[in-house]
């Protein structure tokens, strides 16, 4: 019965969002209350559960998410993102231009949110495609793949960061394993899939226009000589990854040597925490992308403020997703799932991927799908000995499968590249599914070694 109640709750969520056009945040809060009532939770505990779910979720990621938005905005507004893209394209050369675009998307995707990366890179890629007289989508699709993969698998992006928090995983190890999985996934779902997609949906690759780029927002263009250097731009964008990686390596050395209570390792752990990493990265960006280039602090703070305003609703949606997850846990739904699969030989990794995939198809949001999955599978993990870092990545992989009409990313890609519905399904929806399946496959392979 609890699983039937959750199914009906998800249907209500879909109806509220798609039929009545109710805001996703409001819809999630309403459904959280409805499911809590239906599960028979004590009335005097429902509000506390909803508030605790939101507080626990935002308490762990609001700082990371907010600082990440500021970092991306500072790099973009200084012209650092444009410098990275154009330098890579110049170095790779015309024959390997597609790989240059993928590399640019991957590096920038670590620091920028998916939508912001599209806004910055689409105009650049479009101009290059016109100059070289090659298909815009031939370059744009692999670029979008790189952005999507980093968004799904690599901290400090909100999805993998918040799932790591829920599972109690080491964010540094999630990043390390995520990089191992992300690189081959980008290659397969990016340049290699583009070859197949061009044969399946040839009309999509024959577009001469770039779609409604302006609908994404204003992407400021710079003269290349007015942008910061490639080295400092790339270093600033990759600084969060560098800090997390170093902290993880030192932590592994600490575990291997059996050292404890050492102030140096405690300091490294503090520096390597996601919140500290993002704070230090923002402070670095204020210098490298700001004061070192004689940009007034007031102007830098305007960029910071505008980036936070842009993610306000997204933060509320994340928090509401956490409320729904807490209702599922406190209402005993996770225990019901555990009973359902008791004695099952299905790997928790596959189960997490499958539940996240079903949730993603049902309601569209990858982050909500991941959070809901956490509430369902956490009870299943007890006593299994499953690697929690790989659980994060398996959940992340499932949560981005089959992007379709209830996913904002679907419409962004459709409008950006000027595609029809059929062309978007044949390219973007298939691409996201390929990323999801490849992600699971590489997680299962990695599970044999870690």
Image (cartoon, grey):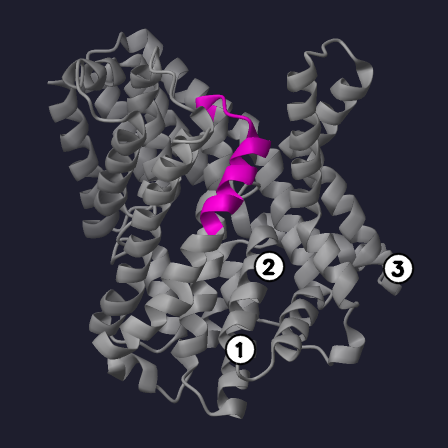
The crowding category of the residue bearing disc 2, from other C-alpha atoms within 10 Å (few below 14, some 14 to 19, many at least 20), is many
**Residue nearest the viewer, comparing 7 with 307:** 7
The answer to whether residue 271 is above or below residue 239 is above
**Does the rendering let one see residue 387?**
yes
Residue drawn 71% across the image and 39% down it: 243
**Which corner quadrant of the image does residue 347 belong to?**
top left
CA separation in Å, label 3 and label 1: 34 Å
- Decide if residue 292 is on the left or right side of residue 5: right
Q: Secondary structure at mark 1?
A: loop
Q: Nearer the viewer, mark 3 or mark 1?
A: 1
- Mark closer to the chain start, 3 or 2: 2
* Cβ atoms at labels 1 and 2 below 8 Å apart: no
Residue drawn 20% across the image and 19% down it: 337
**Residue nearest the viewer, comparing 261 with 240:** 261
Q: Nearer the viewer, mark 1 or mark 2?
A: 1
Q: Which residue is mark 1?
A: 96
- Residue 303 picture location, percent across and down: 69, 57
Q: Which residue is mark 2?
A: 108
Q: Secondary structure at mark 3?
A: helix
> Magenta segment range?
166-182
CA separation in Å, label 3 and label 2: 21 Å
- Residue 252 picture location, percent across and down: 64, 25
**Which corner quadrant of the image does residue 244 belong to?**
top right
Q: Which residue is mark 3?
A: 292
- Mark closer to the chain start, 1 or 2: 1
- Decide if residue 131 is on the left or right side of residue 18: right
- Decide if residue 183 is on the left or right side of residue 362: right
Residue drawn 55% across the image and 56% down it: 109
- Residue 327 picture location, percent across and down: 31, 20
The answer to whether residue 100 is above or below residue 335 is below
Q: Nearer the viewer, mark 3 or mark 2?
A: 2
């Amino acid at each position: 019965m609890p699983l039937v109640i959750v199914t009906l709750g998800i249907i209500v969520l879909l109806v509220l969002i798609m039929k009545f056009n109710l805001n996703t945040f409001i819809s999630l809060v309403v459904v959280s209350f409805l499911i809590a009532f239906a599960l028979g939770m004590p009335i005097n505990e429902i509000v506390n559960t909803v508030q605790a779910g939101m507080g626990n979720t935002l308490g762990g990621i609001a700082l990371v998410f907010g600082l990440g938005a500021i970092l991306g905005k500072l790099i973009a507004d200084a012209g650092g993102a444009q410098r990275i893209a154009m330098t890579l394209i110049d170095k790779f050369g015309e024959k390997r231009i597609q790989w240059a675009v993928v590399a640019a998307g991957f590096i920038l995707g670590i620091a920028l949110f998916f939508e912001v990366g599209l806004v910055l890179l689409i105009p650049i890629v479009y101009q290059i495609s016109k100059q070289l007289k090659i298909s815009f989508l031939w370059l744009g699709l692999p670029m979008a793949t790189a952005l999507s993969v980093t968004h799904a698998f690599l901290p400090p992006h909100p999805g993998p960061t918040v799932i790591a928090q829920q599972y109690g995983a080491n964010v540094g190890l999630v990043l390390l394993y995520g990089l191992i999985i992300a690189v081959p996934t980008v290659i397969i779902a990016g340049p290699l899939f583009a070859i197949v997609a061009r044969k399946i949906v040839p009309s999509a690759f024959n577009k001469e226009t770039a779609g409604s780029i302006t609908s994404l927002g204003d992407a400021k263009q710079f003269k290349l000589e007015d942008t910061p250097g490639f080295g400092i731009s790339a270093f600033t964008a990759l600084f969060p990854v560098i800090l997390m990686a170093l902290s993880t390596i030192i932590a592994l050395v600490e575990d291997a040597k059996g050292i404890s209570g050492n102030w140096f390792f405690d300091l490294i752990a503090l520096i390597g925490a996601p919140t500290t990493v993002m704070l230090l990265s923002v402070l670095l960006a204020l210098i490298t992308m700001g004061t070192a280039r004689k940009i007034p602090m007031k102007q830098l703070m305007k960029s910071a403020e505008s980036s936070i305003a842009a993610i306000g609703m997204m933060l509320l949606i994340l928090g509401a997703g956490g409320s729904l997850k807490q209702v599922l846990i406190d209402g005993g739904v996770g225990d019901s799932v555990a009973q359902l699969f008791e004695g099952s030989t299905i790997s928790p990794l596959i189960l997490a991927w499958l539940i996240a995939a079903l949730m993603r198809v049902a309601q569209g949001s990858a982050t909500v799908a991941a959070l809901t999955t956490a509430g369902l599978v956490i009870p299943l993990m007890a006593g299994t000995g499953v690697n929690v870092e790989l659980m994060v990545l398996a959940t992340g992989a499932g949560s981005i499968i089959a992007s379709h009409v209830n996913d904002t990313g679907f419409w962004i890609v459709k409008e950006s590249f000027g595609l029809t519905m059929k062309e978007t399904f044949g390219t973007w929806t298939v691409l996201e599914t390929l990323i999801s399946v490849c992600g699971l496959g590489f997680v299962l392979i990695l599970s044999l070694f870690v």
